[in-house]
Image (cartoon, rainbow, N blue to C red):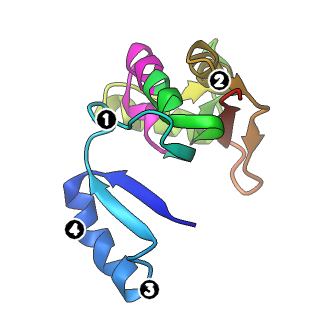
Amino acid sequence: MRATILDLEVAIKYAAPILAKENMDERVVHRAGNALTENFGNAAYDFILVASLVHHFDDATNRALMRRLANALRPGGVVAIVEALRIDAAQKIGQIGGRLDFYFAMTSESGTWSAEEMSRWQREAGLIPRKTMRLRIARDIGVQAAVKPN
């Protein structure tokens, strides 16, 4: 198994030596870039993990990102979003999500999203959303996965 990690150049500067120390630098490749402008290619990946990212962007930006990621998936591939979840689209929110929503509003002008909203982005991108999974250790953190049809 191999992985390509897209991250900002400043983060790679610190992460690359850790991979080398663990002898993983041949299987895990860092690629400097910006998820909003990066060309992910067409049918290039079997699995795409988007972790702690969509809270930085507004709805329209996340819809556009999901379309680009769906295009980058091979048929049968999966895109999974890992995020703090708003309880529902009507703005009900849990304690962790509320704190993060406040923090994200101050630092990136966006906030948490509900699983329903993320599923909608996936569906609009031509993907088939799966049931949201919540982490046992932090119920406000969830995984919203979707599959690209064959």
- The disc placed on residue 39 is 1
Res. 128 image quadrant:
top right
Tag 2 near tag 4, CB within 8 Å? no
Mark positioned earlier in the residue sequence (4 or 3): 4
Mark positioned earlier in the residue sequence (2 or 4): 4
Residue at 43 percent of width and 26 percent of height: 68
Q: Using the image, determine if residue 102 lies above or below residue 32.
A: above
Tag 1 near tag 3, CB within 8 Å? no
Depth check: give the residue in front, 72 or 82: 72
Give the image location of residue 14, x and y in percent. Answer: 26, 71
Q: Which residue is mark 2?
A: 127
Mark 1, secondary structure of its residue: loop
Q: Which residue is mark 3?
A: 22
Q: Which residues are magenta?
A: 51-65
Three-letter amino acid code at disc 3? Glu
Three-letter amino acid code at disc 4? Lys
Of helix, strand and loop, which mostly describes the magenta segment?
Answer: helix
Three-letter amino acid code at disc 1? Asn
Q: Which residue is mark 4?
A: 13
Depth check: give the residue in front, 46 or 95: 46
Mark 2, secondary structure of its residue: loop
**How many other residues sit within 10 Å of disc 2, few (<14), some (14-19) or many (≥20)?**
many
